Image (cartoon, rainbow, N blue to C red):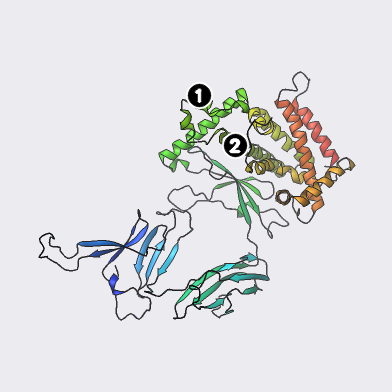
C-alpha cells in the first residue's frame, strides 16, 4: 500500500492518487493492478445502490499497461515514493533455480506527462587478455528523436566520468573485473543508468553441451549422461583442462539449489563425460507418460529395424504393434522421418560414447598411440556387432526418400573425433602424402572442419600440417572401419575362416605403419 507524503521532494514520486491503494499482480492477465478500497462508510439516496462500509473493495484498475513482467514476486514503495518490484523471471518458487532472463529488481518512477530517458550499454567484447580494447555503444539510449540527452561513461568504476561520447572506445590495461556504467541525463535532469561487466586478463571458456540433444527425453529415474566440450584459450592452451574445474548443474525442476552433477573422467582432451542421477521422476504425470511413450515407440521401431530394415519402418506398423491408433502416434513424432532422425541421433551418440570411453581408458592406462588406435577401433566394432541394426541405420544403404537433418553430421564427427589426435603426431609416409595434401586443402576451405579438428588436436590452429595428418588418419580410419565392420555386420565374412576382429586388427596395424605410430 502506498503512503503518500506531500513533504517528499523526490521529483518522480507516485502521486496522491495511489495513496491507500494496494498493488497486486494478476497472473492471468500478466499485469499489475491497483485495488481501491472504500475509505469511509457511505449510503446513497438512490435505492438501487446498497450502503457500503469502510474497507470494502471498490474496483481493480490495471496500471503500467505498457510494462511487460515475467513473474513479479514482491513489490514495495520506497521512502522516495518510487515503486520497487522484484521479478523472479520465467520460473519462480522456493529454492527453484530457473531461467534468469528478465529477473531482477526494478524501480518504477512516476513521470506524469514527461518521460525518463532510456539507458542501454552494448560492448563488442566483455572479456580477454590485457590490454583489452572495448568498443562501447549507447545505442538504444536517450529519448524520442529531437530531445537532447547527455552521456557520462565510467569505465573503471572509480566514480569519475571517462567519456561523454555516445559510442566511445576504452582500453583496459590492467587485469581485473570492472563494471562499465553509462548515465544518460535528460533535459529536465531525469537520469537512467545501465552497466556492463568487463573481465580483463582472461578469456571466458567456450562451453558446448553435446549430449543430451536439446529437447530430448529420458525415462523417469534414469541416469542422464551428458557430454560437455570445453575450450579455454589460456588455461587449455598447453595443458588439458582440469575436469575438477568443470561444474555442470542440473535444472531438474525440484526444490533446492541446482546441485552439481556427478562426474566421470571420460574425456578426450576438452570433452568431458558427466553423469547426473537427475530426479526425473519429479515432473508431472503427463510429462512422464509422454517420455515413456516416446521411449517405447523408439524401442518398438528398433525391433522392427532389426527384423525388416530401415526401409520398412512405418508409423502405422509401430502403432499397430503398440496397440495405438496412427493419429495418436503423431502426437509424439511428426512422421516417419522424425522417428528415423531420433533413432539416428541416438545411434551416433551411443557410438560416440563407446569410442570416447575407450579413448579415456587407453589414455589413463598410458597406452601407446598404436595401442590406442586398436582400442578405439575395437570399441567401435564391439558396439556395431552388439547392435548391427543400429549400425546399419547410420552406415548402411540410404533409406529411400529420407534426408538426414544437418545435426547428424556433427554427431558422426563426434564418433571420429577421438581418432584425430592419434595420427596428428605421427610421421606419415609417401603412401599417404597425397591424401595429406588433400586434407590441407579441405581444412583451408571448410571452417567447420577446421573447428572440429581443433577440438581434438592441440595447437591445431597454429600447426595446420599436424591437423592435416590427424584428418587424413581419421578419414582412413573411417574407410577401414566401415569396410571391415560393414562387411562383418552384413554377414559377408561367413565361411571365410576368420573372425572380424582379426581382419580389423590387421588393417589398423597397416594404418599405424603408414603413420609410423609407436
Q: Quadrant of the N terminus?
A: bottom left
Q: Which numbered circle lies on residue 251? A: none
Q: Position of residue 150 (x, y in %)?
A: 52, 79
Q: Residue furthest front?
A: 146
Nearest the eye: 184 or 100: 184
Q: Element under label 1?
A: helix
Q: What whole-number distance in Å separates the C-alpha atoms at marks 1 and 2?
A: 20 Å
Q: Quadrant of the C terminus?
A: top right
Q: Quadrant of residue 52?
A: bottom left
Q: Position of residue 470 (x, y in %)?
A: 78, 46
Q: Position of residue 420 (x, y in %)?
A: 75, 45
Q: Tell me if I can see residue 442 in this picture.
A: yes
Residue bearing the label numbered 2: 341
Indicate whether 291 appears above or below 13: above
Nearest the eye: 377 or 83: 83
Sequence-wise first label, 1 or 2: 1
Q: Which numbered circle lies on residue 321? A: 1
Q: Quadrant of residue 475?
A: top right
Q: Quadrant of residue 25?
A: bottom left
Q: Is residue 455 left or right of residue 165?
A: right
Q: Residue furthest top?
A: 495
Amino acid at each position: 500500500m502506498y503512503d503518500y507524503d506531500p513533504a517528499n521532494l523526490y521529483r518522480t514520486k507516485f502521486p496522491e492518487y495511489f495513496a491507500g491503494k494496494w498493488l497486486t499482480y494478476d497472473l492471468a492477465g500478466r499485469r499489475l493492478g491497483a485495488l481501491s478500497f472504500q475509505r469511509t462508510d457511505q449510503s446513497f439516496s438512490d435505492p438501487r445502490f446498497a450502503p457500503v462500509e469502510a474497507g470494502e473493495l471498490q474496483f481493480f484498475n490495471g496500471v503500467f499497461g505498457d510494462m511487460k513482467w515475467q513473474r513479479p514476486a514482491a513489490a514495495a514503495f520506497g521512502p522516495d515514493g518510487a515503486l520497487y518490484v522484484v521479478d523472479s523471471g520465467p520460473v519462480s518458487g522456493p529454492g527453484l533455480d530457473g531461467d534468469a532472463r528478465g529477473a531482477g529488481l526494478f524501480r518504477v518512477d512516476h513521470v506524469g506527462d514527461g518521460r525518463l530517458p532510456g539507458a542501454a550499454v552494448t560492448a563488442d567484447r566483455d572479456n580477454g587478455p590485457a590490454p583489452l580494447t572495448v568498443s562501447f555503444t549507447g545505442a538504444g539510449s536517450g529519448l524520442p528523436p529531437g530531445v537532447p540527452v547527455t552521456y557520462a561513461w565510467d569505465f573503471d568504476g572509480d566514480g569519475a566520468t571517462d567519456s561523454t561520447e555516445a559510442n566511445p572506445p576504452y582500453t583496459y590495461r590492467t587485469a581485473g573485473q570492472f563494471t562499465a556504467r553509462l548515465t544518460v541525463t535528460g533535459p529536465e535532469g531525469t537520469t537512467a543508468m545501465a552497466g556492463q561487466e568487463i573481465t580483463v586478463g582472461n578469456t571466458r571458456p567456450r562451453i558446448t553441451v553435446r549430449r543430451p540433444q536439446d529437447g530430448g527425453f529420458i525415462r523417469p529415474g534414469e541416469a542422464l549422461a551428458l557430454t560437455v566440450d570445453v575450450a579455454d584459450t589460456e588455461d587449455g592452451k598447453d595443458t588439458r583442462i582440469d575436469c575438477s574445474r568443470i561444474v555442470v548443474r542440473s535444472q531438474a525442476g525440484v526444490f533446492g539449489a541446482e546441485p552439481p552433477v556427478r562426474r566421470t573422467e571420460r574425456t578426450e582432451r576438452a570433452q568431458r563425460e558427466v553423469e547426473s542421477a537427475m530426479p526425473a521422476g519429479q515432473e508431472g504425470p503427463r510429462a512422464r507418460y509422454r517420455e515413456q511413450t516416446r521411449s517405447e515407440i523408439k524401442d518398438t521401431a528398433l525391433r522392427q529395424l532389426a527384423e525388416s530394415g530401415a526401409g520398412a519402418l512405418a508409423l502405422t506398423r509401430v502403432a499397430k504393434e503398440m496397440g495405438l491408433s496412427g493419429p495418436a502416434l503423431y502426437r509424439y513424432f511428426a512422421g516417419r522421418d522424425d522417428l528415423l532422425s531420433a533413432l539416428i541421433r541416438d545411434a551416433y551418440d551411443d557410438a560416440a560414447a563407446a569410442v570416447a570411453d575407450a579413448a579415456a581408458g587407453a589414455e589413463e592406462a598410458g597406452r601407446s598411440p598404436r595401442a590406442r588406435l586398436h582400442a578405439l577401433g575395437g570399441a567401435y566394432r564391439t558396439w556395431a556387432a552388439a547392435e548391427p541394426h543400429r549400425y546399419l541405420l547410420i552406415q548402411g544403404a540410404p533409406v529411400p526418400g529420407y534426408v538426414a537433418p544437418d545435426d547428424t553430421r556433427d554427431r558422426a564427427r563426434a564418433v571420429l573425433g577421438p581418432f584425430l589426435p592419434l595420427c596428428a603426431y605421427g610421421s606419415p609416409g609417401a603412401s599417404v602424402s597425397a591424401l595429406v595434401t588433400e586434407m590441407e586443402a579441405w581444412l583451408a576451405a571448410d571452417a567447420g572442419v577446421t573447428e572440429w579438428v581443433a577440438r581434438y588436436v592441440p595447437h591445431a590452429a597454429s600447426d595446420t600440417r599436424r591437423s592435416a595428418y590427424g584428418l587424413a588418419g581419421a578419414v582412413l580410419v573411417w574407410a577401414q572401419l566401415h569396410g571391415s565392420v560393414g562387411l562383418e555386420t552384413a554377414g559377408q565374412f561367413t565361411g571365410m575362416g576368420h573372425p572380424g576382429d582379426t581382419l580389423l586388427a590387421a588393417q589398423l596395424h597397416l594404418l599405424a605403419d603408414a603413420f609410423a605410430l609407436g
